[in-house]
Amino acid sequence: MLLETKNLTKRFGGLIAVNNVNFSIERGKINAIIGPNGAGKSTFFNLISGFHKPTAGQIIFKGEDITHLPANKRAKLGIARTFQTTHLFEQSTVLDNVIIGHRLRTSSTLFDAIFRTKRLKREEAQCKEKAMEVLEFVGLTDAAHKIVANISQEEKKRAAFALALATDPEVILLDEPAAGVNPDETEGLEELIVKMAEYGITVCLIEHKMQMIMKIAHKIMVLNYGEKIAEGTPEEIKNNEIVIQAYLGG
Ligand code: ADP
Ligand code: MG
């Protein structure tokens, strides 16, 4: 396994958003997390990526305890993520978004990100080359110089993948990548996620589109009110009574 959580818990005041979750993300696989709205899925990602500090529990990445590392250090170690709502600079080009996004993620402060731009001009060309490489990987070569505000929702999702991939991650956490895109476009994103996994990037995927999950996930964890209520292969989850009840409100 690549990443493991041990009794991971997050409280917001009186609310337990993530409750004692033990989960392992397996190397090279598509690991999925499903569950109703408010189940704690995004919070789980926020804990893994270092955006939130856990109330209790541990996060182990490649055998190392990263529970208390800041987000930028985790990004450098190879943990990348996308957000439920895409965080892109709408008035910048797709290419600039990838370049800027990479800096913001790997710098400890905004100041550092800006300062580095000036100090490391030499790296500029290299950075651009890398950005074009990831844009090609996600199928956005032709859109590289377009302003984000003018591209489609599906292209924005691809751009968000590119931002995450620019850090050369070992694991990529995708928070509802197919939300808000139409069914035709969903298939394209699905293919891209499979392509990432085939390329050797471990995927952890939160998604509501069950058809997609059932088709591409190797393993699924089900969260409900912050707790893991089931875990297994798509086939096992489909037939799990507890899961069916949680979803149908039984
Ligand atoms: P999901 O992604 O499964 O829909 P979330 O992880 O976003 O669920 O939220 C889980 C619970 O934690 C919800 O009840 C939500 O309102 C709460 N929550 C999430 N983030 C915060 C926060 N920053 N402060 C307070 N409560 C939060
Ligand atoms: Mg969420």
Image (cartoon, rainbow, N blue to C red):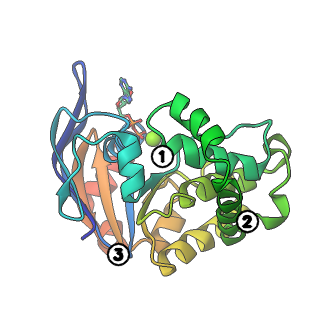
Crowdedness near tag 1: few (<14), some (14–19) or many (≥20) residues, C-alpha within 10 Å: some
Tell me the amino acid under the disc marked 1: Thr
Residue under circle 2?
184
Numbered mark located on residue 86 in the image: none
Query: Going by the image, does 36 lie left or right of 187?
Result: left
Crowdedness near tag 3: few (<14), some (14–19) or many (≥20) residues, C-alpha within 10 Å: few
Numbered mark located on residue 106 in the image: 1
Farthest top residue?
Answer: 13
The answer to whether residue 214 is visible is yes
Badge nearest the viewer, 1 or 3: 1
Residue 134 location (% of width, % of height): 65, 65
Judged from the image, the quadrant occupied by ligand 2 is top left
Residue 77 lies in quadrant: bottom left
Q: How far apart are labels 1 and 3 at the CA level?
A: 39 Å
Residue under circle 3?
235
The answer to whether residue 178 is visible is no
Residue at x 48% of width, y 46% of height? 106
Query: Going by the image, does 159 lie left or right of 193?
Result: right
Helix, strand or loop at disc 3?
helix
Earlier-in-chain disc, 1 versus 2 = 1
Tell me the amino acid under the disc marked 2: Asp
Query: Going by the image, does 150 lie left or right of 158?
Result: right
Viewer-nearest residue: 27 or 21: 27
Tell me the amino acid under the disc marked 3: Glu
Helix, strand or loop at disc 2?
helix
Earlier-in-chain disc, 3 versus 2 = 2
From this view, report whether residue 208 is shown above or below residue 232: above
